[in-house]
Amino acid sequence: MTRVVTLAGGVGGAKLADGLQAHLGDALTVVVNTGDDCWRHGLLVMPDHDTVLYNLAGIEQVEWGWGIEGDTRVVMDQLGVYGEETWFTLGDRDLALHIARTARVRAGARITDACLDAQAALGIAARILPMTDDPVATEVRTADGWLEFQEYFVHQRQAPDVLGLRFAGLADATPTPEVREAFETAEGIVIAPSNPLVSVGPVLDVPGMREHVQTARARGVPVAAVSPIIGGRALKGPADRMLAAAGHESSALGVARLYAGLADVFVLDTADADAAPAIAALGLRPVVTDTIMTDDTARARLAAEVLGAVG
Ligand code: FO1
């Protein structure tokens, strides 16, 4: 089976990763963004890892794209009684992950090892690797100053205009040995349909990560990127507004420009088929298909198309 490494962030990346796992099983490695990670009630919460974890375990809350299907909020409600913040909602079963993982990390385990423990416990075939075990924190500049990512994304419901982005700690972060080894043995690389600025961007900008991708490409490993923008819009989250605010075109072509020189193939939705010639002019082979993953069948179908492009 082709060993594939996928770079992913939130919901879109998790859905494609789930589709890829259906085909690849343990030949899939997902390298996830950790810039959204945060400490809540003394516990380490890793939204992008955990969204992929629950999707690959088949227990994700599908409507929201995060958390566990059918989860309850008894602990959250009681935390409110004690005056704790409750705007960042953590379900009871989700809290169990944060308690177990935080306990392992406090006992000296690497974050990667604590994550791999949870994946094994949930019987997940693929591997989900944090991009680094070093602390990285995405921050969003708004008219009211710099906000922590979840304060912007959840508490302020992505309402403020994004005037800037920064990634505290990223310049000093290093890829884990597992991430380096995944790229060294990769036979295909997929950039998932995640936010190019705050999900895929931080992964690629871990010092040395782009070199890992380019070294793989130099030995013939194909790289396919999937557009997270369809008809100028993001299906979920603020990617379209963030792209525009950062001076990029909020379109499949605008995203393709960000991956030119890094990817060989660009997978875009039929809604944007007219952009294919301009994308080809960037040196990316366009693959036009239905990229909307409404259910497991659609996830596996898109994954098959993507694997066909890197297989
Ligand atoms: N997103 C929300 O819109 N509201 C929440 O209360 C919320 C809680 C939450 C808890 C755990 C977790 O892993 C994710 C959670 N998210 C919530 C989603 C999260 O903010 C996003 O998944 C990422 O940070 C953006 O990709």
Image: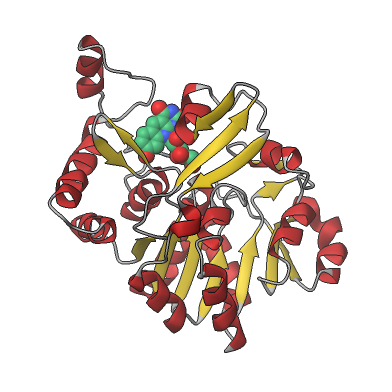
239 is higher (above) or lower (below) than 130: above
252 is higher (above) or lower (below) than 301: above
203 is higher (above) or lower (below) than 238: below
Q: Is residue 86 left or right of residue 268?
A: left
Q: Is residue 84 visible?
A: yes
- At a point 36% along the width and 43% down the height, the residue shown is 60
60 is higher (above) or lower (below) than 156: below
Q: Position of residue 180 (x, y in %)?
A: 41, 75
> Looking at the image, which residue sits at the far bottom?
219
- At a point 53% along the width and 22% down the height, the residue shown is 156
Q: Position of residue 91 (x, y in %)?
A: 28, 30
Q: Is residue 209 left or right of residue 162?
A: left
Q: Quadrant of residue 244?
A: top right
In this view, the residue in front, 302 or 207, is 207
Q: Position of residue 52 (x, y in %)?
A: 40, 52
Q: Is residue 2 visible?
A: no
Q: Quadrant of residue 85?
A: top left
In this view, the residue in front, 71 or 4, is 4
The count of marks equals 0
Q: Quadrant of ligand 1?
A: top left
Q: Position of residue 114 (x, y in %)?
A: 22, 56
Q: How is the image coloured?
A: secondary structure
- At a point 51% along the width and 59% down the height, the residue shown is 203
Quarter of the N terminus within the rendering: bottom left
> Looking at the image, which residue sits at the far front?
172
Quarter of the C terminus within the rendering: bottom right
